[in-house]
Amino acid sequence: MFIRLTKEQQEQIIADIQRFFYNQRDEDISDFEAERVFDFVKENIAPYIYNAAISDAKYVMDSQLSAIEDELVALERPIKLK
């Protein structure tokens, strides 16, 4: 999965992974090892999270569109038949 991140964001993620391993497993891992974990997450886990986010965004958009349609219907004026 293609994810655009700045160099600074990637460096922060690598540091976060290293900190996680240290805090949770008492392991010091190298930048290279942390990058491999990050690559695994990007390729195998991120698509599920991305798709869930898209689904959530679609739900919000559908809800807002429905509300707009309701507002437009409320603005309609009755037509008097002669």
Image (cartoon, helix red, strand yellow):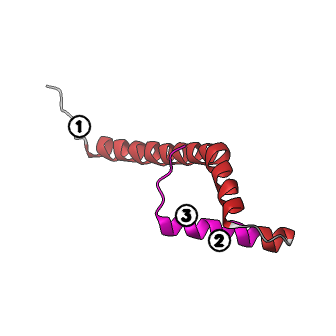
Q: Nearer the viewer, mark 1 or mark 3?
A: 3
Left or right side of 61 for 12? right
Q: CA distance from mark 1 to mark 3?
A: 58 Å
The residue beneath circle 3 is: 10
Residue found 42% across the figure and 48% down from its top: 64
The first of marks 2 and 1 along the sequence is 2
Residue interval drawn in magenta:
1-20
Q: Are marks 2 and 1 in contact (CB under 8 Å)?
A: no
The residue beneath circle 2 is: 15
Residue 10 position, x and y percent, is 55, 64
Task: Give above or below for 74 relative to 37.
Answer: above
Q: Amino acid at mark 1?
A: Pro
Residue found 66% across the figure and 66% down from its top: 31
The residue beneath circle 1 is: 78
Judging from the image, what secondary structure is the residue with disc 2 in?
helix
Magenta highlight on residue 11: yes
Judging from the image, what secondary structure is the residue with disc 1 in?
loop
Point out the image quarter for the C terminus. Answer: top left
Task: Give above or below for 46 relative to 16.
Answer: above
Q: Nearer the viewer, mark 2 or mark 1?
A: 2
Q: Amino acid at mark 2?
A: Ala
Left or right side of 12 for 31? right
Residue 81 position, x and y percent, is 17, 27
| Mark 3: few/some/many CA within 10 Å (<14, 14-19, 20+) | some
